[in-house]
Image: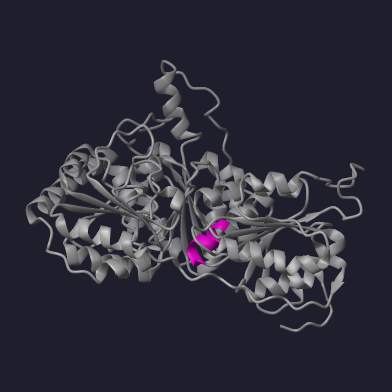
Amino acid sequence: MSSSSRTGAEIIVDTLVAAGVRHVFGIVSIHNMPIVDAISRTDGIELITARHESSAAHMADGYARASGDLGVALGSTGPGTTNLMTGIYESAFASSRMLAITGQAETGYYGKGKGYVHEAENQKLMLETVAGAVASPRNVGEVAPMLNSVIASILSGRPQPGAIEVPIDLQYARCSSAVPELRIADPVGPDAEVLLAATTLIANASKRMILVGGGVSSVAARDALQAFAEKINAPVFTSPNGKGSFPVDHPLHMGNALLRPPIKKLLAEADVLIAIGTRFQAGTGGIKIKMQLPALVHIDIDPHSINLNFNAEVGMVSDAKVALDALLESEYEKGDAEHLEKIRSACDETNALFRERLGPDHAKAMDIFAKYLGPGEFFVRDSTIPGYNWGNTLLPIDHPGGYIFPTSGAIGPGFPIGLGVAVATGTKTLILHGDGGFMFHVGELATAAQYQIPAVIVIFNDGGYGVLRGLQSKQFDGRFHGTELHTPDFVKLAESMGVSALYADNVDEFDTQLKAAMDMAGPVLIELNANNMVPIDGVVPAPGSNA
């Protein structure tokens, strides 16, 4: 790389380009204007201007999850950085390759307590509460090596967000040092003795089951998983994050069903559970759920995940693809066909019960979405009733990493995360939202319109926070408060911001409107009157609904 004199801001952008970054999401500020200007003068990289830094961070997170590449958010010091924090927090939950770049007060004022505009002397400490590697250069010569080090940390091992704060005077200062080459460590492979212990345990077992999490997120890893599952003839279960890691039409695919009572019983009867790329989070038995596991072979890139929620007979620290390739080199007898058939029958039976519990309208809505979710397609949902009830379970996802949602359980990030996914892929992305959560980031409709981001945003409008309404009514003698919301006319609101919009008064109309939206260019919003849908069994309907 050229060693000619460059400003700190130009060095930052040069480093990003060298790392393969094509888009940056952020908001211009007096404390990052040099970086914004350098982006504008650099080919191959574009700034997507968000309407709030929190949205920018969520967009960068979605971009990283969909592409597997570095997602970058740009904010100002002080209030701009505090706004980024929620998105960085979500990114950490999701094991996402997200980088936050922020400004900072001039080095001459730093630590002096002079009340400098946007002063945030403990900003680095704040960032360290939600990010992994965090850097704070104190001279322009440190900018490139520190930024490179943060990026390398993000892209190595278990993905975690990183951050760098760059004082404004360093962004203007010049430096003639070359931008160092980015060096990413090779994927971690299994220890030879651990691999032998795993293959021996698997070979000696007959009743085998596989559980897959978000660590199997590439097509290559999915192919290796399929070959391994077929070789040992074992059923494959997924966590919510693991949806799409195994072909949905494959006879060994069981989906996200491991926690259902009949399946847990069969799990207890198994000889071995092979868990790959999962931390056993709350949705996979990690919290308040009693599970009797057989011998556990736990494969994860993060050594802290091993023995975190369940003790492993064999704990293998490894990249999922590398581990699966290594496991495939051994020979195994086919698994117990009778046990497999019991599992398949139990899954089919519970799937039918799940579908019946959804009721006719939600089951039909799920089927309508499924028509547009083939290989290579991404589905993004917010924390909302249909997302929990049929997004996590029966909705077919046939692409690794193709099911994206707020893993922290936050309300609202779905919309900006989905916009980041659409920017990363350049293809039409389906985003499922509730009306309450959508209002958190409603200003990003203007961003979607400005950049003609190819997304279809479907809002299930029930006039409030439906998930919380149901929880309140069960815990407080039928009372709920603070969960009923005045909502705007979403069609008119979207159109006022330059986004095409459609309205569906019921599920039949939604079928027609979604087909029309998928054929339209740019962003499209569909408002679906959820109060005209038969509610899911056990879900509290909105007051005054027609259900």
Instruction: Report x, y in % for residue 363.
Output: 29, 46
Q: Is 353 above or below relative to 424?
A: above
Instruction: Report x, y in % for residue 213.
Output: 37, 54
Quadrant for the C terminus, please: top left
Most frequent secondary structure within the magenta stretch: helix
- Magenta residues span 61-68
Whether the magenta-drawn stretch holds residue 63 is answered as yes
Quadrant for the N terminus, please: bottom right
Identify which residue is drawn at 38% across, 32% down: 546
* Quarter of the image where one finds residue 3: bottom right
Instruction: Report x, y in % for residue 205.
Output: 15, 54
Of residues 468 and 115, the one nearer the viewer is 115
Q: Residue furthest top?
A: 477
445 relative to 455 in the view: left or right: right
* Quarter of the image where one finds residue 317: bottom left
Of residues 369 and 324, the one nearer the viewer is 324
Of residues 515 and 184, the one nearer the viewer is 184
Tally of numbered tags: 0
Q: Is 487 above or below relative to 431?
A: above
435 relative to 218 in the view: left or right: right
Identify which residue is drawn at 75% across, 84% down: 2
Q: Is 122 above or below relative to 226?
A: above
**Does residue 521 appear in the picture of this structure?**
no
Of residues 3 and 114, the one nearer the viewer is 3
